Image (cartoon, rainbow, N blue to C red):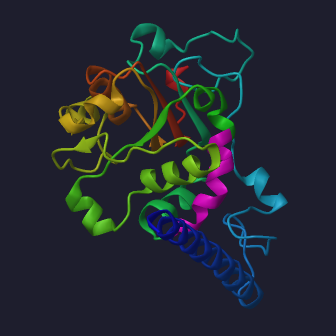
Amino acid sequence: MKMLGEWQILMHYALMQTMRSAAYQILSTFIDAVLPPRCVVTGEIVERQGTIAPAAWSQIDFISAPYCACCGLPFEFTVAADALCAACLADRPVYETARAALVYNEKSRPLILGFKHGDQTHVVRAFTPWLTRAGQEMLAQADALIPVPLHRWRLLARRYNQAALMARALGRETGLPVWPMALQRVRPTPSQGHLKPAQRFANVRKAFAAPPDQAEKIQGKRVVLIDDVLTTGATVQECASVLLKAGAARVDVLTLARVVRAERL
């Protein structure tokens, strides 16, 4: 009888999940009929939510090789696959590699800021395949995804962590587990937006920690840090240092976009 009861519970759960999925599909179809899905870049009507129109591809600068083998900074000329940029040659980051899907510029800025600050969370559907393509190599050998955390007060004000949303969507796409609690922001920090590079590194120093109850999970694992934009790399450097000290075997970084500056070439 006990076995039968457990089986009935499992069947009931599976039925409820199927019904929810079917209801979601019906609701999505109805919404798309009343409010046709639109391109997240141009606003044109597209086949499904979260996709972009063909014309939009020319309006976004996607990053592809050749780029720095470490930080992923794109080069304007053909180089060897293991070539490093001047910055990484001078002072190599603690993370293994960093990759980004887009160049952060005047074309991509409205899209990213709308996602980050404007509650336009639906665009994560479009970002997921871009991230999957950009991080193909690191994702293939990763054990887990870890989003860069927000401090609890900023999370309360914003209501969502954009890095966590991307990590969860990427986790569903790749099958990798997402560990949102593996890293915590233990002190609030001012916005990095208008700080100089040296100030950015000082601003995030000792701002992150790996909780003791997460140490066993991190030990010996290859993890991928997920964030929205890589600028100087100060935040991901600090996060990677904390994870490596906690016992991670390897830390890679995957961001939606990165700033490209000519002086770093």
Q: How many marks?
A: 0
> Magenta stretch containing residue 126, yes or no?
yes
User: Where residue 249 appears, x then y in whole percent?
Assistant: 40, 18
- Residue in front for this viewpoint, 192 or 2: 2
Task: Look at the picture and state if 40 lies above or below 67.
Answer: below
Relative side of 86 to 139, left or right: left
Task: Look at the picture and state if 159 lies above or below 177.
Answer: below
Q: For the point 28% across and 50% down, which residue is it?
A: 191
Relative side of 227 to 20, left or right: left
Q: For the point 82% across and 70% down, which residue is it?
A: 47
Task: Look at the picture and state if 251 lies above or below 133.
Answer: above
Q: For the point 65% across and 73% down, which residue is it?
A: 18
| Residue 211 in view here | no
- Residue in front for this viewpoint, 149 or 203: 149
User: Where residue 49 appears, x then y in whole percent?
Assistant: 70, 70
> Magenta stretch containing residue 131, yes or no?
yes
- Residue in front for this viewpoint, 23 or 124: 23
Magenta segment's dominant SS is helix
Which residue is situated farthest in the bottom direction here? 34
Task: Look at the picture and state if 171 lies above or below 43.
Answer: above
Range of the magenta residues?
120-132
Identify the image quadrant of the C terminus.
top right
| Residue 130 in view here | yes
- Residue in front for this viewpoint, 194 or 237: 237
Q: Quadrant of residue 215?
A: top left
User: Where residue 258 appears, x then y in whole percent?
Assistant: 52, 38
User: Where residue 250 appears, x then y in whole percent?
Assistant: 43, 20
